[in-house]
């Protein structure tokens, strides 16, 4: 996990960008913005997500173009983990498909924005 320490500033920048993008999407959808204690939880969750994305981007194959990996990596992680978890949880709790789709799209936007910021700033791989 040394890669997190080596890339703390890009991770912080990606966290901030993801939060802003997510809040703007909530505002556009007319959703109430979270109270400050909940925003703190979102901050921690998005920082961890940015750290995981940074690790995934560092591990991306060298043969793949960086810009392609920056866009595809969050989509693959989202489609494989986030989307099924959110949709199944929402539907099992009776929250409805529309909310599941809105929440899933929110996280896709956050993840893509974070990955683009991480790629734009650049990441330092850990020493071998």
Image (cartoon, grey):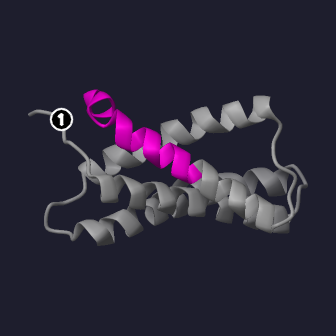
Q: Is residue 40 above or below residue 21?
A: above
Q: Is residue 3 above or below residue 76?
A: above
Residue at image x 74%, y 67%? Answer: 101
Residue 42 visible to an observer of this rendering: yes
Left or right position of 100 against 48: right
Q: Which residue is mark 1?
A: 126
Left or right position of 4 against 35: left
Left or right position of 58 against 104: left
Quadrant in the picture for residue 106 = bottom right
Quadrant in the picture for residue 22 = bottom right
Q: Main secondary structure of the magenta part?
A: helix
- Of residue 6 and residue 13, the one placed in the foreground of this image is 13
Q: Position of residue 93 (x, y in %)?
A: 87, 49
Residue 58 lies within the magenta run: no
- Of residue 11 and residue 111, the one placed in the foreground of this image is 11
Residue at image x 76%, y 50%? Answer: 89
Image quarter of the C terminus: top left
Q: Secondary structure at mark 1?
A: loop
Left or right position of 59 against 53: left
Q: Position of residue 35 (x, y in %)?
A: 83, 37
Image quarter of the N terminus: top left
Region rendered in magenta: 1-18
């Amino acid at each position: 996990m040394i890669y997190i320490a080596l890339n703390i500033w890009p991770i912080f920048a990606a966290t901030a960008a993801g939060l802003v993008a997510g809040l703007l999407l909530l505002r556009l959808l007319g959703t109430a913005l979270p109270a400050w204690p909940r925003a703190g939880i979102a901050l921690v969750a998005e920082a961890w997500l940015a750290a995981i994305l940074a690790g995934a981007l560092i591990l991306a194959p060298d043969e793949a173009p960086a810009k392609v990996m920056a866009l595809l990596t969050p989509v693959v992680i989202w489609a494989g983990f986030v989307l099924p978890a959110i949709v199944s949880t929402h539907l099992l709790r009776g929250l409805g498909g529309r909310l599941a789709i809105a929440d899933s799209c929110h996280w896709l936007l956050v993840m893509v924005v974070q990955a683009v910021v991480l790629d734009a700033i650049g990441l330092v791989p850990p020493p071998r």
